[in-house]
Amino acid sequence: MKVLIVGKGGREHALAWKSKKSPLVSEVFVAPGNAGMTEDATLVALSETDPIALADFAEKEGIDLTIIGPEASLVAGVADEFKRRGLLVWGPDKAAAQIEGSKDFSKKMMVKYGAPTAHSESFTDSEMAKAYVGEIGLPIVIKADGLAAGKGVVIPETMEEALATIDDMLEGNKFGEAGSCILIEEMLVGEEFSLMCFVHNGTVIPMVMAQDHKRAYDNDEGPNTGGMGAYAPTFGADSPEVSEAVAKIMQPIVDGLSSEGMPYTGFLYGGLFRTAEGFKVIEFNARFGDPEAQIILPLLESDLIEIIYNLLTEKPLPEIKWRPQYAIGVVLASEGYPDHPNTGHPLKKLNLNGEDELIFYAGVREENGVLLSDGGRILLNVAIADDFKSAYEKAYRNMKALEVPHTFYRSDIGHKQFNRQ
Ligand code: AMP
Ligand code: GLY
């Protein structure tokens, strides 16, 4: 099979790396990909949000299966175009991708289909929103309805900041269309986890549960980012915790989308809080998490392509096996990320140890044979070991060796796992 991965970040590098391992696969293409993935895939210089160009390429090249990485491609209708042409594609169409693309739609689905979540009210009028906040008081979470690249969520520390945020989102144009509707949400207390599932035709197959670290600096301080590091498993794919989250949250939403005439196909990501009352969902993403993909896929012993292909073509599924190990990944980020990343610095090459130490590249470009930093999140360094502590120590040993000027990383990825053990 020829496989096409759509996207250009670390998640897509991990998808390409894992696809290439499949005995079913002869060639892996990534559109547009990045200069750090050329050992694992052939790069195709096409935009990830151009459905026509991508589908034309798939037809011309005889691509047998396309896997869509980022939400921007889903919302742009890449899956719709591929399906219209009868091309096999893994990823939801525009309608089902609203589960991520619109927080308002997503919240309504959670409420209608009984997935436990934070209480929330939606507003398009700033005066009404401000009056509501005056009534309920802090703490609250304010969210822009649409996609805002991880910047659409504010947890105000003062009433003043809350009122200014409402004005900013509903009156200002910093968020464009994404900010024409906002949600004011109850603040949940608990630990945060990410659960990814394979979903097709109402079937929901959970992966190992992971934990991301979204704030830029140690101790969960600093601005929100796309994710600074992650590890898995926090709970195994067949644990009671994962079963609870699937039964209460993932399956009801998948069934709900089907009954609304928007059947879901692809990776489905639940952003979960483990509260005193059990798991609650704060968001769904219509895709694999990044950096979660880079630590979960190396733990998947089974053939990713066989799972996806058999799901899509309704063939019996292979047994889904996980390596009985821990994976941890730490992001090397450009100084100034997420607001003003300082890029263009040459990166070091490490001699890594096969399957247990991996680097997935994100924001990089190549100049005269040298890889340079070219984005906020440069790469994710992954280490795998039989016990969590060894994985952690190996990952941080490699981080030290990778360090270059004008970059930073968090030094506490996975600390909560030490406390949980
Ligand atoms: P999001 O952009 O939706 O991923 O949200 C960013 C972060 O805000 C999440 O990862 C949570 O840490 C936090 N957050 C969002 N909603 C809530 C909530 N209702 N209660 C507490 N924290 C929240
Ligand atoms: N790691 C969080 C996300 O992919 O949204």
Image (tube, grey):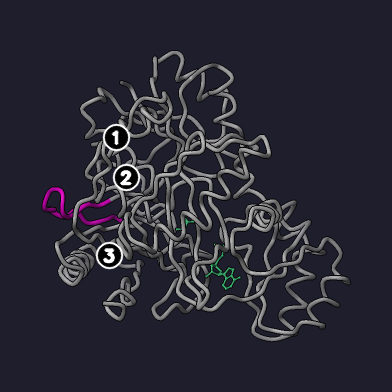
Is residue 242 part of the magenta span, yes or no? no
Quarter of the picture holding the N terminus: top left
**Residue identifier under label 3:** 404
Q: CA distance from mark 3 to mark 1?
A: 30 Å
Task: Give the residue at x 65% y 37%.
Answer: 95
Task: Give the residue at x 40% y 28%.
Answer: 44
**Residue identifier under label 2:** 14
**Residue identifier under label 1:** 19
Q: Horizontally, is 339 left or right of 312 in the view?
A: right
Task: Give the residue at x 86% y 77%.
Answer: 131
Quadrant for residue 175, please give it: bottom right
Where is residue 20? Give x, y as percent: 25, 33
Q: Which region of the structure is painted magenta?
A: 346-359
Q: CA distance from mark 1 to mark 2?
A: 8 Å
Q: CA distance from mark 3 to mark 2?
A: 23 Å
Where is residue 166? Give x, y as percent: 77, 71
Disc 1 marks a residue whose amino acid type is Ser
Mark 3 or mark 2, whichever is nearer to me = 2
Where is residue 170? Give x, y as percent: 80, 63
**Dot 2 alpha-carbon crowd within 10 angstroms: few under 14, some 14 to 19, many 20 or more:** many
**First-in-chain label (1 vs 2):** 2
Q: Horizontally, is 400 left or right of 104 in the view?
A: left
Q: Is residue 385 visible?
A: yes
Where is residue 298? Give x, y as percent: 25, 49
